[in-house]
């Protein structure tokens, strides 16, 4: 798919709804849509202060009345589903059918299309959401993203306190810069007349990395000798619970760390959508080093 966002934006000023707009990825999507001249509406659970040029609807994505209000006059939706249960999404889908916007759904590369049940609850709910959107006839463009580089921001408190990052080990993944995912999302959202070449893209970084690899890259960016310490499952669980994470999320993260198979796959889909290769985690670490100091 060619990079049509600028020409498309000139032909028609899109009205885009961004869910999860307060998150690491959602903020990047909003900023890029604004740069392309789109009208942007965010759907957020809590108002965190006005953002110039962005209309906000405050409420829950599972509340049909809130979703109905948010969808008025909207051409396309950047959809991130925040729950580990797809059942509440049926009301959301009904509202999407009524409003008939284009839907771009952020999913995960952990989905295995060859199995009936996915390896862990996070992959399972994304598989269910994809099926729900397709079965409703919404014809979504699905962007299956690998691990976002921004997830490593969760290590910042440990790195401010010392030189060791500890946590559950996970299989190696092709960590992808959330800025690249945002660029790809915006390219699809603003492709009015030039339809995407396909309805499923797999967004990865250019190399497969372990958590130890990521910590090493952060160490290089920070000019410190850092190391990753894998924790036994029970200890990792107790620490995450002590940090205040909800128990269902902790159990889902533990299941993902234990059951999710290693990904050795990288793709050129970021480049197909944006016109440039995906950035490296090394570059991401340099650009965000100040956040870990």
Image (cartoon, rainbow, N blue to C red):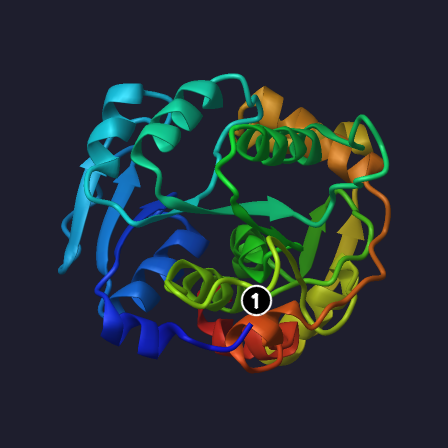
Q: Quadrant of the N terminus?
A: bottom right
Q: Write the residue at 32% across / 20% down.
A: 63
Q: Is residue 7 left or right of residue 217?
A: left
Of 61 and 120, nearer the camera is: 61
Residue 185 location (% of width, % of height):
47, 60
Q: Is residue 20 left or right of residue 212?
A: left
Dot 1, how many residues are within 10 Å of its Cα: few (below 14), some (14-19), or many (20+)?
many
Of 121 and 186, nearer the camera is: 186
How many marks do you count on the picture?
Answer: 1
Q: Please, which residue is most extreme toward the front here?
A: 193
Residue 33 location (% of width, % of height):
31, 64
Residue 53 location (% of width, % of height):
14, 60
Quick check: 187 above or below 74?
below
Residue highlighted by disc 1 = 177
Of 268 and 285, nearer the camera is: 268
Quick check: 223 above or below 22?
below
Res. 151 in view: yes
């Amino acid at each position: 798919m060619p990079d049509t966002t600028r020409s498309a934006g000139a032909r028609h000023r899109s009205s885009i709804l961004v869910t999860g707009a307060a998150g690491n990825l959602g903020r990047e999507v909003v900023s890029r849509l604004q740069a392309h001249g789109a009208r942007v509406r965010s759907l957020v659970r809590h108002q965190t202060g006005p953002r110039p040029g962005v209309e906000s609807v405050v409420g829950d994505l599972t509340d049909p009345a809130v979703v109905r209000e948010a969808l008025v006059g909207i051409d396309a939706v950047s959809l991130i589903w925040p729950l580990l249960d797809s059942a509440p999404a049926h009301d959301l889908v009904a509202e999407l059918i009524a409003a008939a916007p284009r839907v771009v759904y952020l999913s995960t590369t952990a989905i295995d299309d060859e199995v009936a049940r996915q390896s862990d609850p996070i992959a399972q709910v994304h598989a269910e959401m994809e099926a729900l959107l397709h079965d409703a006839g919404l014809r979504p463009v699905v962007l299956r993203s690998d691990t976002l580089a921004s997830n490593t921001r969760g290590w910042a408190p440990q790195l401010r306190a010392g030189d060791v990052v500890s946590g559950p080990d996970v299989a190696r993944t092709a960590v992808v810069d959330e800025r690249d995912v945002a660029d790809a999302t915006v390219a699809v959202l603003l492709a009015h007349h030039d339809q995407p070449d396909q309805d499923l893209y797999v967004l990865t970084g250019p190399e497969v990395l372990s958590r130890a690899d990521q910590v090493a890259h952060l160490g290089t960016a920070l000019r410190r000798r850092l190391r990753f310490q894998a924790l036994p499952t029970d200890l990792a669980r107790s620490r995450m619970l002590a940090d205040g994470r909800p128990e269902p999320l902790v159990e889902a993260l533990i299941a993902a760390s234990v059951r999710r198979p290693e990904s050795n796959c990288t793709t050129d889909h970021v480049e197909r959508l944006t016109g440039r290769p995906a950035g490296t985690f090394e570059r991401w670490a340099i650009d965000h080093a100040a956040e870990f100091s």
